Amino acid sequence: MSSIKVWDLPTRFFHWLLVLSFVGAFLTAESERNRDLHVLLGYTVLGLIVFRLLWGFIGSRYARFSNFVCTPKVVVLYLCQLIKNQAPHSVGHNPAGGVVIVLLLLFGIASSLSGWAVYEDIGADSFTEWHELISNAMLALVCIHVAGVVVSSYLQGENLIAAMITGKKLGDVNQAITSNVASLAWLVLVMVIGLWLWAWPAAKDLNWLLHMIVWWQ
Ligand code: HEM
């Protein structure tokens, strides 16, 4: 096996922008003062996931849902093999990781849509608790996801976090993707940064940053 390109650039940009937006939205959730920024990051999560859903159908080989969404039987079999430390090496996402990824995407949509309903005052407060509940469930999923990534990296003897940065994993040369689709990735990045810069004045000033740093300490 050699080091081959598995994750195209749009998938990697999507992932790290999603991490940034999700973490940012969580850190700004409690304070009234950071409400606009929280909403902006929530919209970013929604936009990124809509993009990822499309990419799951038309993207490169390992980005497609058909590559990593498996039947429950396959997932259970994989988990049994994992417990016995006999799980096969996956070039793309492994079957168990695929389940968590789909759940993360669904919860991301539910979290941002319920947040939108709260912001727009739809349903007279009835969405507030749902928004909190779904977002906390998503945080729990993120913890499971990161723990799964760390455990898989250890068992597989391959740094999966580095792979999500470089796009490269171990595999046969003929399993590599042929295009990085870089131009689309840069377009996504420019659109997200463009949205942030355009909407930033709505956050009034940068005091929130100071408050966050102070809060952090
Ligand atoms: C610092 C924390 C995180 C790390 C280190 C991390 C790492 C990774 C890695 C290594 C993968 C690829 C897994 C594989 O090889 O099968 C992945 C995929 C994924 N992660 Fe994370 N992750 C983090 C946080 C998050 C968060 C906060 C979210 C969602 C809010 C998230 C959502 C996803 C999704 C949706 C995928 C699938 C990527 C795709 O195919 O588009 N991750 N993550």
Image (cartoon, helix red, strand yellow):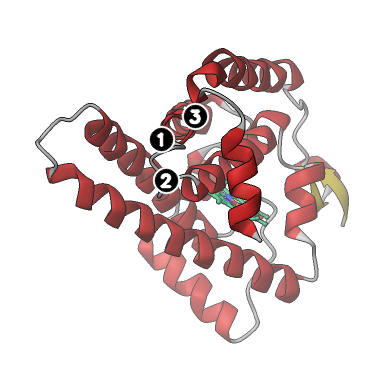
First of labels 2, 3 by sequence position: 2
Residue 49 in sight from this viewpoint: yes
Tell me the kind of residue under disc 2: Ser
User: Is label 1's Cβ within 8 Å of ligand 1?
Assistant: no
Q: Position of residue 174 (x, y in %)?
A: 80, 41
Residue underneath mark 2: 31
Mark 1, residue position = 35
> Residue at position x 65%, y 80% from top?
86
In whole angstroms, how far apart are the C-alphas of marks 2 and 1? 7 Å
Q: Quadrant of residue 127?
A: top left
Q: CA distance from mark 1 to mark 3?
A: 14 Å
Q: Is residue 112 left or right of residue 97?
A: left
The kind of residue tagged 1 is Arg
Q: Residues within 10 Å of mark 2 (few under 14, many from 20)?
A: few
Question: Position of 139 compared to 211: left or right?
Answer: left
The amino acid at mark 3 is Thr
| Image quarter (top left, top right, bottom left or bottom right) of the N terminus | bottom right
Disc 3 target residue: 44
Classify 10 Å Cα crowding around label 1: few (below 14), some (14-19), many (20 and above): some
